[in-house]
Amino acid sequence: MLDIKFIRDNQEAVKKAITDKNIDLDLDHLLDVDQRRRSLLTELESLQATKNQVSKEIPKLSPEDKKVKLLEMKEVDAKSDELKTQLKEVLKEYEDLMAITPNIPSPETPIGKNDEGNVPWSYWSPQLGQVDPKDTDKIAQIPTKFDFEPKDHITLGKELDLIDTEAGVKTSGFRGYYLKNEAVLLHYALIWHAIKKMQEKSFNLFTTPVLVRDFALFGSGHFPFGKDEIYQIGNPGKLSDNDTRENQYLAGTSEPSLLAYHADKILDEKDLPIKMCGISPCFRSEVGSYGKDTKGIYRIHEFMKVEQVVICKADILESDKWLESMREIAQEMLMDLKLPHRVLNICTGDMGAGKYKMYDIETWMPARKNYGETHSDSNLTDWQARRLNIRYRDHEGKTKYAYTLNNTVIASPRILIAILENYQQKDGSIVIPEVLRPLVGKDVIKKQ
């Protein structure tokens, strides 16, 4: 959420952000609603001042004059009630419009309508290390090379008894799956490796609530924009048919829970940055991906994720430093696994309303003959903090809204696609990444 004063003072920049991010919002209408809101508030304040003044005068008046003043006050009360009704309606519209007003993207963010406007920022492979996106010859060498026809993760999973999507669909429905045997060990080895890394990076570890309330999803920006992607609980702890409880939802990431932990708090600048790492199951309906990636475990309804969130002071240079630091942690995970990948600078039309700057990291997946998204790294400046009322007191005693950032450390089982396909061998076996071998307990997955 943006500050309304900022919106009034920077109308052209906000209009450009609305256009560049494909947001359905008429800024002139929002400003008109804001003007009506302020006018009503001014009128109500004036009426209240009149009432306060008259209440002081009444004890000094004669009985006849008191009657006259009391009748006048009844008219003032009626007018005040009428204005309050109008204000309630105007405030609802104002808040709805403010909720979808986008953040201003960074100067480095590419302008684009959709994911086709995303720009490669860097490439990496175990053999070549970091590769400049302009070096097309080296980029062509990055994908894993095989001297045999590689199989996809679905075939490998079936042949090695690691993944069962048929039984998963029967039990859970569309996009359901089972992980089995060494795939389970790989899955939890990845989570544990990520947890230990975040502990080494001095992040506070959290197992976060999966069931969350409206305010947490609104605060993170998942509401109202991504409401179709969120599962709502049909029976949120009702004790009886007549008992009404607040709506509850299954979180698609631990980010809303981590941010909500500090909602309505005034932090101390000396305690910033706050570095949090959430470990949780995640649930997404994938309504917006109808017809995409329907086979295998690339796009599924439930998965495990290790997420990092940083709350820092309101300084764009410091927040940018954290954005890069978080990206480096995500890349470090992929480098530990020796998986070829690239970093994309996400364009305006693909980044979401609240984002100031965003990277996606895509890992090479041989069966796709392309890269697939495995990580997402975002700086939202104070857009989320305003929605959740996360503030801090600086060294001068001034209260400011904090800046927030989030990033994927690891999400599984999607990352298993890259491991299974990149590490497959000619004999049908799969070599386990060296860093995970002590946790998995073996070096190679073979047919039993």
Image (spheres, rainbow, N blue to C red):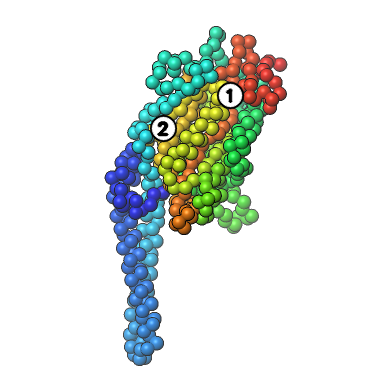
Q: Residue at x 34, y 83 (%)?
A: 69
Q: Residue at x 44, y 47 (%)?
A: 314
Q: Say which quarter of the image contains residue 104.
A: top left
- Which residue type does callout 2 highlight? Ile
Q: Nearer the viewer, mark 2 or mark 1?
A: 1
> Residue at label 2?
346
Q: Vertical placement of 64 versus 440: above or below?
A: below
Q: Say which quarter of the image contains residue 32.
A: bottom left
Q: Vertical placement of 2 versus 407: above or below?
A: below
Local crowd size for mark 2, using a 10 Å CA cut-off: few (<14), some (14–19), many (≥20): many
- Along the line of sight, the residue nearer the viewer: 122 or 188: 122
Residue 443 image position (x, y, % from top left): 68, 19
Q: Is residue 320 visible?
A: yes
Residue 429 image position (x, y, % from top left): 64, 15
Image-based side of 222 in relation to 166, left or right: left
- Which residue type does callout 1 highlight? Leu
Residue 372 image position (x, y, % from top left): 49, 25
- Along the line of sight, the residue nearer the viewer: 24 or 437: 437
| N-terminal label among 2 and 1 | 1
Residue 446 image position (x, y, % from top left): 68, 16
The dot on residue 337 is 1
Q: Residue at x 36, y 79 (%)?
A: 53
